[in-house]
Image: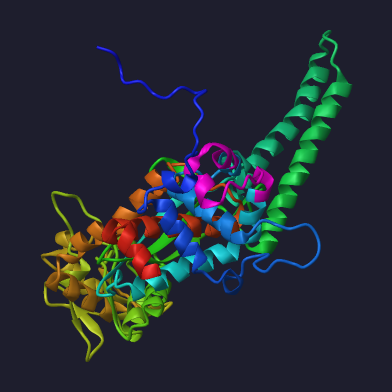
């Protein structure tokens, strides 16, 4: 039996197939085309949104925005690869009407419209709100590290520079010592003193450069610096320390759409709860909001600020514990009873701990040495002469948080099912576990805005379908 045969390459046709016939009615490129057509590019801040009356005509920013949205949707972020897609991909040919911009033109468009990409991403979030895709009942917040362009080899910090300075000092001091020993031994071996002086001069130059870097970083108040990307920071990641940015996202639990995102330089999430929650509340235009996040966001000051902003937060409090062995654990803070009237703590043995000092808003209480010395429970309490208990400046906010978490233990499961889904998609589907392509914080924000816009668009198509989504856009 013969195989299925295709048409001959030399076969002519009276009616050639048009690009319009090759693209289905519910195809992704039709959604992107309609979406970009409805945008006011001049209001969003795109360069050359209105053509000039003189000079050489430029490419329409609408066509280039379509190309980038398609590229990030298909994990094609490189300008050179997008140039190749314009010449071989039928979907791209339909989307931008067979235009063939070169890679430099494509790259310049992304470089010159960084803020406009962020505005476009927010515009699509507003559309999703009007389309009923965002409920606003529960928002989950999380952060993840995305690797920067810069290499770790170009990164320096003050501790590293000081260690290098110590090594240079030892090597510089080593050369004169070796020469003195050679002179004392009256060695017959010929010593090239010129070479030694040259090597010593090179080490002294490196030492001066090191000291200059330290002085400059001290003057700028920097603990670390990357010579190729000054905004990037060394951060701990599952794969070890990497030069990265910390990307924050606020996700609506209804359909896992990203309400708000931010690219930050903070190595942890402890100061991100309040700004992200308030930004999500502003985006939703609601008077009240319910937010959940993991223990990495545990911060009493931020808890208090969210409560004052009518934001109900669910975060597992991450508190320090009294160290002790697993066999004989020591009493923790929760084992002591606080008396708000007298501002003191009562220990499990019934003795009182009084206020010793205040430290940046925190209060430290201490027991009498005589009480601890005669206490039968001392071995279960402390190994020191007396027991100390600290009270956080926002201890009441921590206590209210603990009560909320006990009353709603399902919040952590809701958080996992909401906010971890988008980050998994962004890293595997959009970035492909690769790093950013644009340098500095502004470039990383532009790239992340394109990625989030592509993710939200894909999610909206998955929920509504392409036809219904286009009907709502129309």
Query: Residues in magenta?
Result: 83-105
- Residue name at image x 20 percent, y 63 percent: 414
- Residue name at image x 80 percent, y 65 percent: 54
The answer to whether residue 270 is magenta is no
Residue 277 coordinates in the image, percent (x, y): 37, 73
Taking the image as drawn, is residue 231 in sight?
no
Residue lying at the far bottom of the rendered structure: 341
Residue 290 coordinates in the image, percent (x, y): 27, 76
For the C terminus, the image quarter is bottom left
Q: How many marks?
A: 0
- Residue name at image x 75 percent, y 67 percent: 52
Relative height, residue 139 to residue 449 (above, below): below
Relative height, residue 325 to residue 174 (above, below): below
Q: Is residue 96 left or right of residue 213?
A: left
Q: Nearer the viewer, residue 445 or 317?
A: 445
Residue lying at the far right of the rendered structure: 194
């Amino acid at each position: 039996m013969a195989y299925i045969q295709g048409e001959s390459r030399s076969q002519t046709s009276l009616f050639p197939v048009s690009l319009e016939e090759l693209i289905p009615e519910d195809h992704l490129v039709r959604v992107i085309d309609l979406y970009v057509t409805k945008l006011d590019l001049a209001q969003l801040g795109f360069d050359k949104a209105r053509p000039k009356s003189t000079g050489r005509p430029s490419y329409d920013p609408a066509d280039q925005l379509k190309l980038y949205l398609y590229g990030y949707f298909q994990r094609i972020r490189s300008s050179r690869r997008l140039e190749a897609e314009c010449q071989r991909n039928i979907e791209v040919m339909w989307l931008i009407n067979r235009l063939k911009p070169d890679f430099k033109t494509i790259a310049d468009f992304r470089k010159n419209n960084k803020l406009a990409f962020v505005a476009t991403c927010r515009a699509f979030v507003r559309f999703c709100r009007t389309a009923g895709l965002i409920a606003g009942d529960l928002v989950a917040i999380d952060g993840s590290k995305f690797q920067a362009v810069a290499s770790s080899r170009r990164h320096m910090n003050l501790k590293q520079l000081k260690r290098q300075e110590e090594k240079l000092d030892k090597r510089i001091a080593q050369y004169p010592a070796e020469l003195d020993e050679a002179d004392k031994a009256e060695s017959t071996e010929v010593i090239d003193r010129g070479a030694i002086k040259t090597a010593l001069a090179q080490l002294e130059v490196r030492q001066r450069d090191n000291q200059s870097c330290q002085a400059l970083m001290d003057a700028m108040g920097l603990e670390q610096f990357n010579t190729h990307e000054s905004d990037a920071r060394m951060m701990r990641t599952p794969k070890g320390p990497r030069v990265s940015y910390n990307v924050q996202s606020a996700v609506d639990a209804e359909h896992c759409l990203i309400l708000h995102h931010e690219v930050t330089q903070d190595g942890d999430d402890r100061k991100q709860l309040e700004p992200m929650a308030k930004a999500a509340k502003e985006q939703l235009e609601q008077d009240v909001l319910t937010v959940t996040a993991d223990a990495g966001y545990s911060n009493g000051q931020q808890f208090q600020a969210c409560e004052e902003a009518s934001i109900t937060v669910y975060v597992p409090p991450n508190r320090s514990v009294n160290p002790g062995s697993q066999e004989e654990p020591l009493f923790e803070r929760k084992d002591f009873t606080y008396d708000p009237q007298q501002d003191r703590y009562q220990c499990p043995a019934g003795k009182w701990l009084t206020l010793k000092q205040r430290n940046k808003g925190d209060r430290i209480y201490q027991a009498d040495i005589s009480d601890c010395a005669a206490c039968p429970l001392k071995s279960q309490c402390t190994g020191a002469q007396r027991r100390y208990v600290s009270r956080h400046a926002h201890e009441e906010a921590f206590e209210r948080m603990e009560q909320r978490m006990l009353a709603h233990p399902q919040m952590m499961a809701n958080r996992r099912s909401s906010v971890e889904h988008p980050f998994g998609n962004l890293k595997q589907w959009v970035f492909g576990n690769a790093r950013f392509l644009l340098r500095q914080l502004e470039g990383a924000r532009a790239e992340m805005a394109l990625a989030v816009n592509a993710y939200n668009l894909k999610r909206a198509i998955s929920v509504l379908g392409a036809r219904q989504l286009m009907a709502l856009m129309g």
